[in-house]
Structure formats: C-alpha cells, structure tokens
C-alpha cells in the first residue's frame, strides 16, 4: 500500500492532522494501536484556546463545538479562603477559552473522517517506522496475524508519550528534558451541575483542587493526591468530603454531589524532546512534549504543532518548497517552551510539594496575593491561559 502521509496515532493530533491534510488533497492513513471505543473512553482535556477552536473550524468539525461548548471569559483563583476572579476577556482585549471535552473533539474528528471514507486502521499492532532518514520512508504493522507494509513520503508521529515514533529516533540525535512531580491528580466526572459557572483553581493547605466542568449538567473535579494513592481506595464519599475541605464556604454550600461515572489518577510531568523532526519523520503533540495539566495547555499545544505541520506539508506538495518542513521543529519549540514554562510555574504556585516547609506555602500566598492585586500580574496569567499569539516573540 502507498500513501503520502502515514500518521501513527488516532488521538486529537493524528485525527486533526489527517483532516487538515485531506482538505488540502493530501492522502493519509492513520494507524492506531487501540480500538476507537478505547480512544473515546479516555477522559482528558476540557479547555480549548481560540487557536485550537479556529483549527477545528478550519478542519470542518466545529459545528457541534460551537453549539455545545461553553465560552468562558474568566477563571477563579481560591487561596486563603478567598476567591479572586481573573477577567481574561478584559485583560487580553477580548479573548476567551471554550470548555468542550477532548472526548467530544475526538468524536467529531472521528465522525468526519468516517463520513469522508478516510482510512483508519484500529488495532494496528507492532507498528514500526523504517527508513525515515531517506526520501522513501516505510511503516509496517500487524493485523489479523499478517504484517502490512505502507510506503509513504512522510511519517507523522502523533502517537503520544508512550508511542513508537520518538522511541525509534536515533538516541544520538535527540535531547530530552524531564521533570516528574511528586503527586498526581485524582479526577472524577459526575452528572451534577458544576459548583460555579467558571473554573475554580484552588491552593489549599490540604493541597490543590480544581473545579471544572463539561456542560451545565456535568462536572469534572480534580484533587492533588500522593502518587502512592490507589484509585480503588477513593470512594465517591471520600472524594466529595476531601473536595469540600479544600473549598471556600460559598462553594461548599453550592456543591452538588452524586455518583461519579469516571475516576482516575494521572501523574504530572513536564517533558520536551528536541528536535521534533528526524529526516522524513515528524513528531507532534504528546509524542514530543508533556505539560502538567494545571495550565490546560496539552491539547492546545498539540493543535498548534498540527497547524505548523499541516501547513509545512501543504507547502511541500503545492509549492515544492521544503522551507516549512525545515523550520517545523524550531517554530513549534518556541511555543512549546513558553507553554511548558507557564504550566510548570502555575503547577508550582498551586500545589503542596511534600518536601516544602511552611515557608513555601507563605511564599505561594504572598505571590498569589501580589498577582491578584496587580493588573500586570493578572494579565500575565490571563494572556498565557487564553494562549499567547501565534506570532509571539517574532
Ligand atoms: P494522545 O491523546 O495520547 O494520542 C496518541 C494516540 O496514539 C496511540 N498510540 C499508538 N498507535 C499506534 N501504534 C503505537 N505504537 C502507538 N502508541 C500510541 C494511542 O493509543 C493514542 O490513541 O496524544 P495527542 O493526540 O498528541 O493528544 C494530546 C492530548 O491528549 C493531551 O495533551 C491532553 O489531554 C492534555 N490535557 C489537557 N490539555 C489541554 O489542552 N487542556 C486541558 O484542559 C487538559 N487537561 C490533559 C488534561 C491531560 C490529562 N491527563 C490524563 C494526562 C487533563 C488530564 C487529567
Ligand atoms: C478539565 O476540565 O479536564 C481541565 C480543565 C482545566 C485544566 C485541566 C483540566 O487546567
């Protein structure tokens, strides 16, 4: 079999890339290790930046998002028992974010791909990438006991943190930077109305908490927990009890509890791979960078990688120019490091680190107090949260 671009991974990066390439007349095949149901079962991101919204529109899959997504113009910060609102819209000259789950984004992209009859191979096992240091790369995979080869012009590694593409890059050509945080996020989904119209980020003496949502009737809550905690040990009752203890009086009063239908613990990590291109193989999304979820940046960064990668490939085919593919890595990494910086900073400001003493909690409070009483401090949070402009720094 032959295609122009072989895409590994049917997460949001791979599906969005496939859609944008198809719109430009570039054929592609997606190979996914899991079943489609499994991919849709993973509950992850919830906040989309304008750049991501625009790209989903460009890919022709924005209709349901605009109907069902919730536009948020601010976030709330809770510390020392007091809530403070960061008015993102006012501080950024009119920018907002959209609350719309990654599951829904993935669903919309999968439906569009299926409707257009584009090839996706689910349960593609033992995917291997070959000869990407030449102009004739190949991919092989196993399905139903047979090995299938695919010849292509480019390989797009959209296969997440545990994927095969980054692992296949020559060790001598790659630099990796990593920080693992000494806690995780225990998250639940419940069909209860959200405690507040906006998201509440909480710095409490008992650790971080986040009150998020998926719709007016579906809540998503997170608690900072030790890495040694097991999800089975957390009953719904224990979760709600602990969340209550981290909230302020008003939120405690408004909190509506109920049975959860999803519960999981996610570890937190900052990670970057440089470069993001190895000959004819390109990495995008979680395959080459991970941020702790505090800044809500992971999916949004994946979307901008895909924006740069699709335009580089379109330039290659339509204008016979390699300029875009040659600068792909450099263009992405500027934005990646800015988002990594913000996510690390926001995580450090909002969580209790096990080895920090009481003085660090005091530093955090003093910094939060400063930020909430300084317009430039609040603007720094707002402009990073809604997403820095694509041409920032250039
Ligand atoms: P994904 O979603 O991991 O998809 C990669 C796909 O590749 C497949 N795969 C393979 N396929 C074939 N062969 C192999 N060898 C393969 N190895 C892997 C996998 O099965 C999978 O289907 O990566 P992608 O597409 O780059 O998307 C990245 C996002 O999923 C991620 O950055 C976000 O979820 C991060 N994130 C958030 N991002 C935001 O922008 N806003 C948020 O509010 C936000 N909240 C979050 C988050 C991530 C979280 N967790 C669980 C880490 C909240 C949480 C709790
Ligand atoms: C979510 O709703 O899952 C979510 C929202 C904001 C974050 C992280 C996760 O910073």
Image (spheres, grey):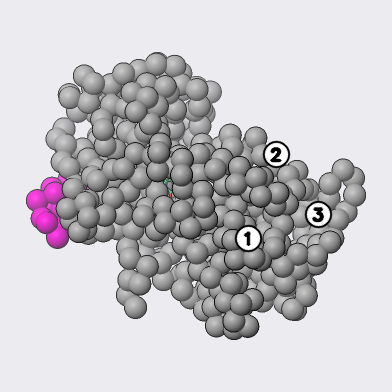
Q: Is residue 394 above or below residue 189?
A: below
For disc 1, the marked residue is 22
For disc 2, the marked residue is 35
Q: Which mark is residue 72?
A: none
In primary-sequence order, the first of circles 1 and 2 is: 1
The nearer-to-camera label among 1 and 2 is: 1
Q: Residue at x 42, y 22 (%)?
A: 191
For this orientation, the residue located farthest to the right is 146
Element marked by disc 1 = helix
Q: Is residue 362 visible?
A: no
**Dot 1 and dot 3 residues touching (CB under 8 Å):** no
Where in the figure is residue 207, as x and y percent of width and height? 31, 36
Q: In which image quadrant can residue 77 be found?
A: top left
Q: Is residue 206 left or right of residue 334?
A: left
**Dot 1 and dot 2 residues touching (CB under 8 Å):** no
Give the CA separation, mark 3 to mark 2.
15 Å
In primary-sequence order, the first of circles 3 and 2 is: 2
Q: Is residue 64 above or below residue 53?
A: above
Residue 357 drawn in magenta: no
* Nearer to me, 163 or 347: 163
* Nearer to me, 374 or 282: 282
Main SS type for the magenta part?
helix
Q: Quadrant of the N terminus?
A: bottom right
Q: Is ligand 1 less than 8 Å from the beta carbon at label 3? A: yes
For disc 3, the marked residue is 141
Q: Is ligand 1 less than 8 Å from the beta carbon at label 1? A: no
Q: Is ligand 1 less than 8 Å from the beta carbon at label 2? A: no
* Nearer to me, 155 or 116: 116
Q: In the rendered structure, which segment of residues is drawn in magenta?
A: 364-379
Q: Is residue 298 above or below residue 197?
A: below
């Amino acid at each position: 079999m032959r295609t122009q671009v072989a895409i590994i991974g049917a997460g949001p990066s791979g599906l969005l890339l496939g859609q944008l390439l198809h719109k430009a007349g570039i054929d592609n095949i997606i190979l996914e290790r899991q079943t489609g149901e499994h991919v849709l079962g993973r509950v992850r991101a919830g906040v989309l930046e304008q750049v991501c919204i625009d790209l989903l529109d460009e890919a022709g899959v924005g209709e349901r998002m605009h109907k069902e997504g919730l536009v948020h113009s601010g976030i709330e910060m809770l510390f020392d028992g007091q809530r403070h609102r960061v008015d993102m819209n006012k501080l950024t000259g009119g920018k907002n974010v959209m609350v719309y789950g990654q599951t829904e984004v993935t669903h919309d992209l999968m439906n569009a791909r299926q409707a257009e009859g584009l090839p996706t191979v689910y349960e593609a096992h033992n995917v291997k990438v070959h000869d990407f240091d030449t102009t004739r790369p190949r991919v092989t995979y196993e399905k139903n006991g047979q090995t299938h080869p695919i010849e292509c012009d480019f390989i797009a590694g959209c296969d997440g943190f545990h994927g095969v593409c980054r692992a296949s890059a020559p060790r001598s050509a790659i630099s990796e930077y990593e920080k693992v945080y000494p806690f995780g996020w225990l998250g639940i989904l419940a069909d209860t109305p959200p405690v507040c119209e906006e998201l509440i980020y909480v710095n409490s003496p008992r650790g971080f908490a986040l009150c998020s949502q998926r719709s007016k009737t579906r809540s998503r809550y997170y608690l900072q927990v030790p890495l040694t905690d097991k999800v089975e040990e957390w009953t719904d009752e224990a979760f709600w009890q602990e969340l209550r203890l981290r909230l302020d009086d008003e939120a405690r009063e408004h909190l509506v509890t109920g049975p959860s239908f999803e519960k999981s613990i996610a570890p937190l990590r900052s990670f970057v791979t440089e470069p993001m291109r190895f000959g004819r193989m390109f990495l995008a999304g979680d395959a080459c960078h991970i941020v702790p979820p505090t800044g809500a940046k992971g999916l949004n960064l994946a979307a901008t990688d895909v924006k740069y990668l699709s335009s580089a490939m379109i330039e290659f085919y339509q204008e016979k120019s390699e300029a875009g593919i040659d600068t792909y890595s450099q263009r992405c990494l500027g934005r990646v490091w800015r988002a990594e910086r913000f996510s690390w900073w926001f995580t450090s400001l909002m969580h209790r680190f096990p080895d920090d003493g009481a003085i660090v909690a005091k530093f955090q409070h003093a910094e939060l107090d400063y930020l909430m009483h300084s317009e430039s401090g609040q603007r720094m949070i707002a402009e990073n949260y809604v997403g820095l402009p694509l041409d920032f720094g250039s």
